[in-house]
Image (tube, grey):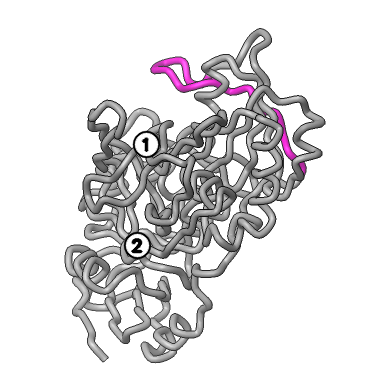
């Protein structure tokens, strides 16, 4: 078993990978342990938004930026679009232990905030080495633990990681979707004012919640849309009864092929009714699956706020935020479905449109939060 030396003489936290690697360090946040898939995120800002994004359900986020937690946490920068979506990232790994916050908006320091949300933290490890491991060998199943009274047996942590079922073939959208549905009206944040409220009557947009980020809802409301959020399992008949002017297929976690077993028939029925559709992230993948394409698991995925994608129609390059571990197989796109964006990192598909239909989607997050 390979063991990295912690910076602390008495480590209180550890990350155990399924290949037997154990990295020890300083535990913080929630006391206890969790299993998940380890990914890395390259964003330099937005750690609070990342840790509350429902798309990270079932994952342990390694931050490549070394200074995480320096602006603390507040009550506003939360991305889970429902209370059910609050069960997002299972753990967070970082290079340096969080320092005392220095920001006028801070209400809690990061360890306190993570403790309240049940997120296990680990600091004082070589995140560059961990990131390189993920790049070379893919996202591993892992156990993260914070144990102030003493770490459990390393072999038991590794075995727990190995025995976890993992994200592939898992429908995680059902764990983070709204149960009852709701009609949000909050608009985007502005400096010194906070969030606003939508006024007046606008087009009615139904958002199918597979783990929707709150800023998607805020920006739709800011654009004048009247919103109704429905559960991931909502039927086409139930959605049609709401008389939408358009439907958004939201972001979310898990294996899109698993969620598509019930989502794809709904999407096809909406397209047959010529309902305008916008898919985002998981919603993009679900639209592709409904059209007959395939999705595949990625080795390390795309997680960050600095990803270049090319607009295939104009040639323009956009720098976007991404968070996905599965991708649409571009070779599987059927006739009548065109690729609209492509990742300049690895050539993977980042958008599509359906010829003759009012249906488009993007793999990246157009709300750009973080």
**Residue 83 higher or lower than 128, as above or below:** above
Q: Position of residue 354 (x, y in %)?
A: 50, 36
Based on the displayed image, in which of its 4 quarters is residue 298 positioned?
Answer: bottom left
**Residue 137 higher or lower than 102, as above or below:** below
Mark carried by residue 39? 2
Front residue of this view, candidates 51 and 12: 51
Front residue of this view, candidates 85 and 97: 85
Front residue of this view, candidates 111 and 273: 273
Q: Is residue 55 magenta?
A: no
Q: Position of residue 98 (x, y in %)?
A: 29, 52
Q: Secondary structure at mark 1?
A: strand
Q: Secondary structure at mark 2?
A: strand
How many numbered marks are there? 2
Answer with mark 2 or mark 1, whichever residue precedes in sequence.
2
Q: Is residue 129 left or right of residue 291?
A: left
Specify the segment rendered in magenta. 180-195
The residue depicted at 36 percent of the width and 67 percent of the height is 27
Quadrant where the image shows the N terminus:
bottom left
Q: Is residue 54 visible?
A: no
Residue at the spot of label 1 = 340
Q: Is residue 30 visible?
A: yes
The residue depicted at 41 percent of the width and 71 percent of the height is 146
- Assess disc 2: are there few (<14), some (14-19) or many (≥20) residues with their C-alpha within 10 Å of its C-alpha: many
Q: Position of residue 350 (x, y in %)?
A: 37, 44
Q: Is residue 237 left or right of residue 157?
A: right
């Amino acid at each position: 078993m390979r063991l990295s030396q912690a910076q602390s003489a008495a480590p209180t936290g550890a990350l155990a990978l399924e290949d037997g690697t154990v990295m020890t360090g300083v535990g913080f946040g929630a006391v206890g342990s969790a299993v998940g898939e380890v990914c890395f995120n390259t964003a330099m800002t937005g750690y609070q938004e990342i840790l509350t994004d429902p798309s990270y359900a079932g994952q342990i986020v390694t931050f490549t930026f070394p200074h995480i937690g320096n602006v603390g946490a507040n009550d506003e920068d939360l991305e889970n679009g429902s209370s059910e979506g609050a069960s997002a990232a299972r753990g967070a790994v970082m290079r340096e232990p969080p320092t005392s916050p220095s920001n006028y908006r801070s209400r809690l320091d990061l360890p306190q905030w993570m403790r309240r949300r049940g997120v296990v933290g680990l600091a004082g490890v070589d995140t560059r080495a961990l990131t390189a491991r993920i790049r070379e060998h893919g996202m591993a199943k892992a156990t993260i633990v914070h144990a102030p009274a003493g770490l459990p047996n390393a072999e038991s942590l590794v075995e727990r990681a190995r025995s976890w079922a993992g994200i592939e073939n898992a429908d995680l959208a059902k764990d983070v979707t709204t149960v009852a549905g709701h009609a949000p009206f909050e608009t985007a944040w502005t400096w010194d004012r906070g969030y606003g409220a939508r006024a007046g009557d606008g087009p009615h947009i139904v958002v199918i919640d597979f783990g929707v980020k709150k800023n998607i809802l805020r920006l739709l409301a800011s654009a004048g849309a009247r919103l109704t959020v429905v559960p991931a399992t909502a039927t086409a008949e139930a959605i049609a009864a709401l008389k939408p002017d358009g439907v958004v297929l939201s972001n979310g976690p898990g294996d899109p092929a698993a969620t598509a077993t019930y989502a794809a028939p709904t999407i096809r029925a909406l397209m047959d009714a010529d309902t305008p559709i916008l898919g985002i992230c998981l919603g993009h993948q679900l639209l592709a699956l409904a059209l007959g394409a395939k999705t595949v698991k990625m080795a390390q995925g795309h997680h960050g706020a600095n990803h270049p994608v090319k607009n295939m129609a104009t040639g323009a390059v956009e720098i976007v935020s991404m968070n996905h571990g599965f991708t649409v197989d571009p070779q599987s796109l059927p006739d009548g479905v065109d690729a609209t964006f492509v990742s300049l990192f690895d050539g993977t598909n980042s958008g599509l449109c359906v010829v003759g239909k009012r249906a488009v989607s993007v793999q990246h997050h157009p709300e750009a939060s973080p």
